[in-house]
Amino acid sequence: MSNKPEEEASLRDREVGLEAKIRQELTRSGERERLKQVLRERLTECGWRDDVKQRCREFIAQRGRDNVTAEEVVRAVRPQGRAAVPDSVKADLLARIRGFMADV
């Protein structure tokens, strides 16, 4: 008899704990804010921000300005926006996080 579900739950718990520790260290050091700034700059440079703005405008135009809330726009556009982040931007950010953690 395998403990597969328990092993998977334990692994998920360890991953969540590790993510929390990384987030805490990034925040404590101020690196999280620096990474957010780099991310904003990279997303602007590659045109991602303009693309997401256009998607928001199109969604609002379809629904009618007075018939849509900000939450509805976010709910509709967020999945598309996340999927549209270039792999190069994701890879750069991950490399920066790994480099930071290697120095800690």
Image (cartoon, rainbow, N blue to C red):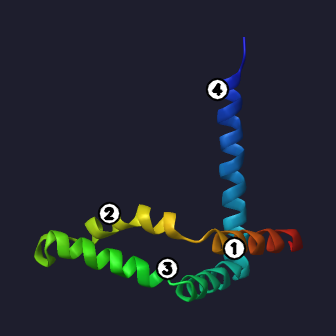
Tag 4 residue: 5
Q: Dots 4 and 1: beta carbons under 8 Å?
A: no
- Tell me where residue 84 appears, x and y as whole percent: 50, 68
Tag 2 residue: 76
Please tell me whether mark 1 sits on a helix, a strand or a loop.
Answer: helix
Instruction: First in sequence, mark 4 or 3: give its number.
Output: 4
Disc 4 from disc 1: Cα separation:
32 Å
Q: Residue at x 71, y 80 (%)?
A: 31
* Disc 2 packing (10 Å; few <14; some 14–19; many ≥20): some
Disc 2 from disc 4: Cα separation:
33 Å
Instruction: First in sequence, mark 3 or 2: give its number.
Output: 3
Please state which of the two labelled residues, at mark 4 or mark 3, is closer to the viewer. Answer: 3
The type of residue carrying mark 2 is Ala
Q: Residue at x 66, y 42 (%)?
A: 12
- Observer-nearest of 79 and 97: 79
Q: Which mark is residue 39?
A: none
Quadrant (top left/top right/bottom left/bottom right) for the N terminus: top right
- The quarter of the picture where residue 46 lies is bottom right
Tag 3 residue: 48
Q: Dots 3 and 2: beta carbons under 8 Å?
A: no
Please state which of the two labelled residues, at mark 4 or mark 1, is closer to the viewer. Answer: 1
Q: Is residue 83 above or below residue 39?
A: above
Please tell me whether mark 4 sits on a helix, a strand or a loop.
Answer: helix
The type of residue carrying mark 4 is Pro
In the drawing, does residue 49 fall left or right of residue 100? left
Please tell me whether mark 3 sits on a helix, a strand or a loop.
Answer: helix
Instruction: First in sequence, mark 3 or 1: give its number.
Output: 3
Instruction: First in sequence, mark 2 or 4: give its number.
Output: 4
Instruction: First in sequence, mark 4 or 1: give its number.
Output: 4
Quadrant (top left/top right/bottom left/bottom right) for the C terminus: bottom right
The type of residue carrying mark 1 is Leu
Instruction: First in sequence, mark 1 or 2: give its number.
Output: 2
